[in-house]
């Protein structure tokens, strides 16, 4: 649609959006006429505003009020008129210092990334990742008494998973050691996905290599491994309270609360992550463009990050009102995703 607008219409749409980002309110024809580089009367500006409104790009919140952009107008602005800003050295340094601390696990790194996004944007920072497909460093069965054992799995990036499993009657303590050694020999150095494939092929063979009771422990450990690899993934949201800063009515408050509830339940996040996975670079979802934000009046700016094998393993972003400063936040999200990807790699 951007090609259908002449230069004058594009400039007025840009000014309306920039005013909306700055004030959150409508802007009138007289204000716009004063800000235009070309000399135009307020009447001429009103004619252009009417045309843009007819196209569904602007609307008037009240009779005889100024105009504000619709979600379609914001989308058109972001896709065709937005001029991205540049991160300052101070902002780059803050991102690097916050995220790149030595000795942190992946979970801690993602927590810090979400926190720094919230702090710099003054909105909510969000990190999504599937269960991280890290390579296994250690696996062990630890006896907990009659009939129970703890499966301990440690990945190369420092994540630890513990699960309690039942044990068959009559199992000797040495069988736990045998099961640990067997799984370690088959799984250490493999990712979750690779391990599942290996064990799918080995589960019958293992019965011939080890005794029946030990084989049952191996199968229980395998079931635990599959359960871990099928987890819902990681969702970290920091700074949700910042989204309440622009709330002016009870209905707005209820919409934000509904968004919080959806985020806590991870509703729609896997579909959102899938959409990010299929695209390249920063993605912008404005209002109703994504079901998760359709009722909240919020937008999401999000970028994927990859592991050392160049596979997308998650995404980082900022949730804010539709009037957030896209020009400033888009490069911020993009840079942070690159930092996180580099550190994970």
Image (spheres, rainbow, N blue to C red):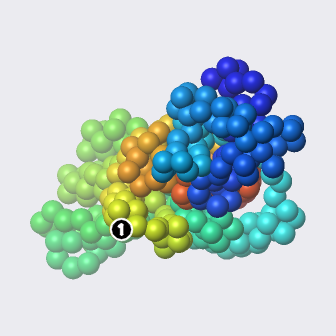
Identified at 73% across, 55% down, the residue is: 328
Q: 43 or 83, which is in the foreground?
A: 43
Across the whole image, how many numbered discs are drawn on residues?
1
Identified at 46% across, 68% down, the residue is: 248
Residue 157 placement, left or right of 175? right
Q: 315 or 22, which is in the foreground?
A: 22
Residue 218 placement, left or right of 126? left
Secondary element at image label 1 = helix
Residue 116 vertical position relative to residue 75 in the rendered view, above or below: below
Q: Quadrant of residue 10?
A: top right
| Rendered location of residue 175, percent (x, y) | 28, 64
Q: Quadrant of residue 50?
A: top right
Residue 193 vertical position relative to residue 6 in the rendered view, above or below: below
Q: Residue furthest top?
A: 4
Q: 213 or 114, which is in the foreground?
A: 114
Residue 222 placement, left or right of 274? left
Q: What residue sits right under mark 1 in the picture?
A: 250
| Rendered location of residue 62, percent (x, y) | 48, 51
Residue 235 placement, left or right of 79? left
| Rendered location of residue 44, percent (x, y) | 73, 34
Say if residue 21 shows up in the picture.
Answer: yes
Identified at 31% across, 66% down, the residue is: 163
Say if residue 314 shows up in the picture.
Answer: no
Q: 181 or 288, which is in the foreground?
A: 288
Q: Residues within 10 Å of mark 1 (few under 14, many from 20)?
A: few
Q: Residue furthest bottom?
A: 145
Locate the N terminus by quadrant: top right
């Amino acid at each position: 649609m951007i090609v259908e607008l002449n230069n004058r219409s594009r400039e007025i749409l840009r000014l309306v959006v920039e005013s909306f980002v700055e004030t959150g309110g409508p802007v009138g024809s007289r204000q716009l006429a004063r800000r235009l580089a070309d000399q135009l009367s307020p009447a001429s500006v009103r004619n252009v505003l009417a045309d843009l409104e007819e196209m569904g790009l602007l609307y008037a919140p009240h009779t005889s009020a100024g105009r504000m952009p619709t979600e379609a107008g914001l989308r058109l602005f972001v896709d065709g008129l937005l001029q991205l800003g540049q991160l300052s050295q101070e902002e780059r340094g803050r991102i690097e210092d916050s995220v790149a601390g030595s000795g942190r696990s992946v979970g801690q790194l993602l927590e810090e990334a979400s926190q720094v996004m919230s702090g710099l944007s003054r909105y909510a920072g969000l990190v999504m990742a599937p269960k991280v497909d890290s390579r296994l460093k250690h696996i062990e069965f630890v006896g907990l008494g009659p009939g129970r054992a703890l499966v301990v799995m440690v990945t190369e990036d420092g994540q630890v998973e513990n699960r309690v499993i039942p044990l068959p009657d009559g199992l000797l303590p040495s069988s736990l050691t045998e099961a640990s050694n067997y799984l370690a020999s088959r799984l250490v150095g493999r990712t979750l996905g690779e391990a599942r494939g290996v064990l799918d092929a080995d589960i019958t063979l293992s019965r011939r290599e080890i005794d029946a009771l030990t084989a049952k422990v191996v199968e229980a450990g395998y079931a635990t491994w599959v359960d871990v690899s099928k987890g819902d993934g990681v969702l970290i949201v920091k700074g949700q309270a910042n989204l309440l800063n622009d709330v002016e009515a009870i209905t707005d408050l209820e919409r934000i609360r509904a968004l919080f509830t959806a985020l806590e339940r991870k509703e729609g996040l896997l579909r959102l992550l899938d959409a990010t996975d299929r695209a390249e670079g920063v993605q912008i979802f404005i209002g109703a463009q994504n079901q998760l934000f359709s009722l909240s009046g919020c937008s999401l700016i999000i970028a994927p990050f990859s592991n050392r094998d160049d596979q997308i393993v998650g995404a980082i972003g900022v949730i804010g009102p539709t009037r957030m400063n896209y020009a400033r936040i888009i490069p911020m999200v993009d840079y942070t995703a690159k930092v996180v990807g580099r550190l994970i790699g």
